[in-house]
Image (cartoon, rainbow, N blue to C red):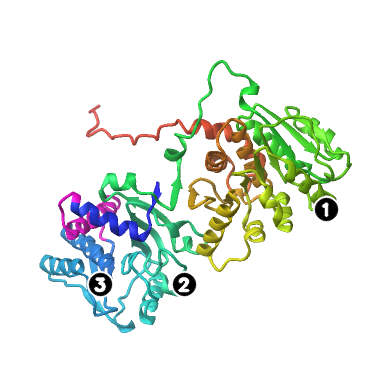
Amino acid sequence: MKIFSKEQIYEGDKLTAKKQNITSTELMERAGIEIFNWLHLRMQGAQVPIHVFCGIGNNGGDGLVVARHLITHGYNVNTYVVNCSDKRTKNFLVNYDLIKQTTKKWPNMLSCEADFPEMHNDDIIVDAIFGIGLNRPVNDWVKSLFNHFKDSQAFTLSVDIPSGIYTDKIPEDENGVVWANYTLSFQSPKLVFFLPETAKYSREWEVLDIGIDREFIVASETEAELIGKREVLPIYKPREKFVHKGTYGHSLIIGGSYGKIGSVILTSRATLSIGAGMVTAFVPKCGYQIMQTAFPEAMVITDENEQIISNINFDIEPKVIGLGIGIGTETVTISALEKFLKSNKTPLVIDADGLNILSKKKALLKSLPEQTVLTPHPKELERLIGKWKDDFDKLEKTKKFSKKYNVIVVIKGANTITVFQDKYYINSTGNPGMATAGTGDILTGVITGLISQDYDPLEAAIFGVYLHGRAADIAIEDLGYQSLIASHIIEALGKAYVDLFKQPEQPQVEEAKQEEL
């Protein structure tokens, strides 16, 4: 799903109105009706007090449409205008007149704290105060209104975006933002829904289709894209009948040190479980018996050193190499990796201490093959690209880093973001149970195993992150978050593949009337 910028959203609205021969007010009516339909479907006429707070711009106009339809359908509605400026948009004024024609209970004007209404925790708040056009901090009394929302503990539904959030920067004051329980976003999600510093302002979100021109949606190139099942299905490569293990490549996993051979086991298992034809592990001598015993499907090559990797030397020709897991940062290991990278031409996936060594020896970044996949967690990323001011700055710095070295950067997190050149691919799978040792090692193996099967590195990163998260989602159905361990994710990778082709369950239609006994 494409994630449109603020400018693209405005462009899409204008083009839609022109091509569909409707006014912007009619498009606003369509958007407001979608919000109303969402509420009406769930409330079925329940007389819960609904407080609709409208700004004086187009987001407020959306709110007035919602309030009008709620009123005409007999709901218990109180409408308020947050009177924070003298400027009003045309569409707001049109809908303000329409609601006055609909009911004798005109919207209440709010201009200070004394005007705030009483609300309770079993009420509903509809936040339609500020939309994507906000470009300045909110007034102090409006901040107090937002805190009034929070103090009431009422369910808060935001229209398009929680009021007070910008689309392209971090809010200056978290008290100047509505903390929404749910956000209904028009046509596409907003990038801020997926960033750690701004995702907290909406616990859940949903996209409503308001009929933006389909040709515009298809033709528009966006900076960010949300990756779900629909996006990865075209990437999937089905298997042919007359194939053998050599068809799906030989992967090499280089890593491990005394006490950290387990990471290589996990990565190697994930590499084969995702579909690589063969896997060889290159480990210190201390890892030989462990690897052969714990994972007999893998072949093993050992370093001459007993406890650490000191000289990377092998006589096989792997299709791809996964590197860095559990390898340590001993001086001799750094030298071995430096020597290896300067001569290597095989595609790479680098994680963990491999990344930390690159951070210490940044000149080595120029030796990486094109489209090497780097899989840092936030601290490893910071060592690579430097400190960032906020999440937007982090993405910008990562984008520049990707372009400079022609590498793919997988920023691991709640919504793992794969960055390549000028594009962000935001993953939609995964859960808090993955905050456990070894899950990153498995991701390295998954991406390595996909490249081994002839997925190009960017496809492997995007698809691998999706499958990794989906396997974890499937695993927690039986285990819960707290009991999930990394091995469970490997065991669920097959189910994640099968899940790609499962059709969503259709709701059962109840019989209009039961047969008489």
**Which residue is farthest left?**
101
Nearer the observer: mark 3 or 1; the answer is 1
**Which residue is farthest top?**
242
Is residue 450 visible to the viewer in this orientation of the structure? yes
Asked whether residue 43 is drawn in magenta, I would say yes
Nearest the viewer among 282 and 492 is: 282
Residue labelled with disc 2: 174
Identify the mark nearer the N-term, 1 or 2: 2
Identify the mark nearer the N-term, 3 or 2: 3
Question: Residue at 78% across / 42% down in the picture?
Answer: 261
Question: Residue at 76% across / 28% down in the picture?
Answer: 296
Question: Residue at 24% across / 31% down in the picture?
Answer: 514
Q: CA–CA distance between discs 3 and 1?
A: 62 Å
Give the crowd class for mark 1: few <14, some 14-19, many >=20 residues within 10 Å: some
Q: CA–CA distance between discs 3 and 2?
A: 22 Å
Label disc, if present, on residue 330 of the rendered structure: 1
Q: CA–CA distance between discs 1 and 2?
A: 43 Å
Question: Residue at 65% across / 59% down in the picture?
Answer: 379
Determine the secondary structure under disc 1: loop
In the displayed structure, 376 sits above or below 175; it is: above
Region rendered in magenta: 19-47
Q: Amino acid at mark 3?
A: Ile
Label disc, if present, on residue 112 of the rendered structure: none
In the displayed structure, 28 sits above or below 20; it is: below
Identify the mark nearer the N-term, 3 or 1: 3
Q: How many discs appear?
A: 3
The image position of residue 133, as x and y in percent, is 33, 67
* Left or right: residue 386 compared with residue 144: right
Residue labelled with disc 3: 56
Q: Amino acid at mark 2?
A: Glu
* Left or right: residue 154 compared with residue 342: left
Nearest the viewer among 46 and 77 is: 77
